[in-house]
Image (spheres, rainbow, N blue to C red):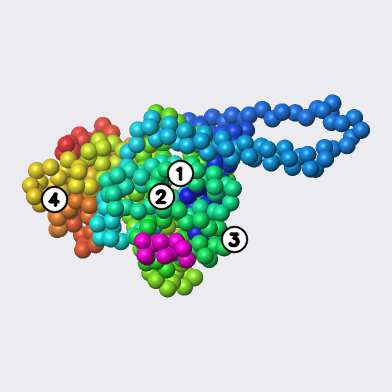
């Protein structure tokens, strides 16, 4: 769905996703979900010798061009309607969970425009999540760049009634003008332009410099998004488009803002692009695996934004939405995470990530130094030494909660019951 794409450095919208539907209809597809995949190949009609002219002559080039033109005109009329029907079917039948919407709310309330971005192959439900947030925050102004081509016209027809601000331009033909137009839309009109940093034609999941340049010029943070589905088709296109199956469960994650300073040199822009790349890939993995808090109910599960392996364990960037049951009644009007809940979260994460074959035997050295508040950016650091896992919850102001968890082989010692 190349109808929503990036700017600068070759990122543009050309409606190629619509074209991909036609091209992919005869290509390999992979079905994934619950760690199962299958491959299917559409039969390719063979060309027999008898079908060629007896004298060996080929069809005139003019006739072939007329045929291609007729097919293209037919596709331009029919494919956008088919694509929109398919998208509406998926949006209506899939069960969608959106996490991280509060991040957008804080930016919208402050009047700060931002740039939503996601990989080209994960567009369908990232767009859906942004439109859902617009229902919650009517002042959110979404926009996108669309190329001045026939494919762009098709993409514009697919999304004509979504109320998105459109900037027509191409990053490869007149990209500088398109960049100026969308910059003015951000600064003057408060538009939040949607971009795909690896669009329109790849390389796959590689951030191009245009999106970082735009964020630097406009002073707008980048907001990474990703989604995964319990059952989906993965197309054989360059972007490996994920197409969820009807009635599947879809999880959309809205990540932490990536702030971009103004007047960055090339080295600094490369660092921001690398940070954005890691954020997008981490969100995709987290959305797919539901780790490291998959054992918890949705009403108990933190939002996870990044998981990084360290020399001794793992670091997890997370936040606890105020809607979680942990904050109910503790305390009314001034919600604070109970200390026992923080320890429980550390137990769940350490078992999932580091000690899957062992059980908790005991905990100790617990220190509660600062309160953990709703939606506070946190880092949970887990480090392993033998059968012991040390944990530290850190906020921007310092250590909040720390302690150690001792594990044992199953059956060796009784399991210390974690609080419910």
Q: Is residue 182 magenta?
A: yes
Q: Which mark is residue 173?
A: 3
**Sequence-wise first label, 4 or 2:** 2
Q: Nearer the viewer, residue 371 or 391?
A: 371
Q: Which residues are magenta?
A: 180-189
**Residue under the point 28% across and 34% down:** 410
Residue assigned mark 1: 159
**Sequence-wise first label, 4 or 3:** 3
In this view, the mark in front (4 or 3): 3
Question: CA separation, marks 4 and 1?
Answer: 43 Å
Q: Nearer the viewer, residue 341 or 268?
A: 268
Q: In the structure shown, which secondary structural element does the residue marked by tag 1 occupy?
A: loop
Q: Do tag 1 and tag 2 residues touch (Cβ < 8 Å)?
A: yes
Residue assigned mark 2: 164
- Tell me residue 330's x, y (percent): 10, 46
- The crowd level at tag 4 (other Cα within 10 Å; few <14, some 14-19, many 20+) is some
Left or right, 345 with reference to 208: left
Q: Which mark is residue 336?
A: 4
């Amino acid at each position: 769905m190349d109808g929503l794409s990036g700017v600068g450095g070759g990122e543009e919208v050309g409606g190629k996703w619509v074209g991909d539907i036609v091209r992919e209809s005869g290509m390999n597809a992979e079905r994934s979900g619950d760690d199962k995949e299958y491959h299917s190949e559409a039969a390719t009609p063979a060309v027999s010798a008898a079908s060629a002219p007896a004298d060996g002559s080929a069809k005139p080039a003019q006739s072939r061009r007329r045929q291609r033109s007729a097919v293209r005109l037919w596709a331009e009329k029919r494919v956008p309607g088919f694509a929109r029907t398919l998208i509406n079917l998926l949006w209506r039948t899939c069960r969608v969970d959106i996490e991280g919407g509060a991040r957008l709310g804080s930016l919208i309330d402050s009047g700060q425009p931002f740039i939503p971005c996601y990989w080209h192959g994960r567009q369908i439900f990232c767009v859906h999540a942004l439109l859902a947030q617009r229902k919650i925050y009517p002042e959110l102004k979404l926009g996108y760049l669309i190329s001045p081509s026939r494919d762009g016209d098709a993409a514009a027809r697919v999304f004509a009634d979504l109320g998105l601000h459109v900037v027509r331009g191409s990053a490869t033909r007149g990209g500088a003008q398109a960049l100026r137009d969308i910059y003015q839309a951000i600064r003057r009109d408060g538009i939040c332009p949607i971009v795909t940093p690896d669009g329109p034609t790849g390389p796959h999941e590689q951030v191009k410099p245009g999106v970082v340049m735009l964020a630097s010029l406009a002073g707008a943070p980048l907001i990474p998004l990703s989604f995964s589905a319990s059952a989906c088709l993965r197309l054989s296109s360059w972007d490996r488009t994920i197409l969820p199956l009807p009635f599947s469960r879809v999880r959309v994650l809205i990540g932490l803002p990536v702030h971009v300073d103004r007047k960055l040199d090339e080295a600094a822009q490369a660092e921001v692009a690398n940070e954005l790349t890691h954020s997008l890939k981490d969100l995709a993995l987290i959305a797919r695996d539901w780790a490291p808090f998959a054992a918890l109910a949705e009403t108990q599960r933190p939002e996870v934004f990044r998981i990084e392996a360290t020399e001794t364990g793992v670091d997890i960037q997370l936040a606890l939405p105020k809607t979680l049951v942990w904050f109910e009644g503790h305390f009314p009007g001034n919600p604070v995470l109970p200390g026992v809940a923080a320890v429980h979260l550390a137990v769940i994460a350490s078992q999932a990530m580091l000690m899957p074959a062992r059980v908790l035997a005991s905990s100790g050295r617990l220190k509660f130094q600062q309160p953990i508040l709703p939606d506070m950016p946190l880092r949970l650091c887990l480090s392993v030494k033998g059968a012991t896992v040390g944990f530290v919850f850190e906020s921007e102001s310092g250590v909040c909660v720390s302690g150690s968890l001792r594990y044992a082989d199953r059956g060796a010692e009784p399991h210390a019951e974690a609080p419910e």
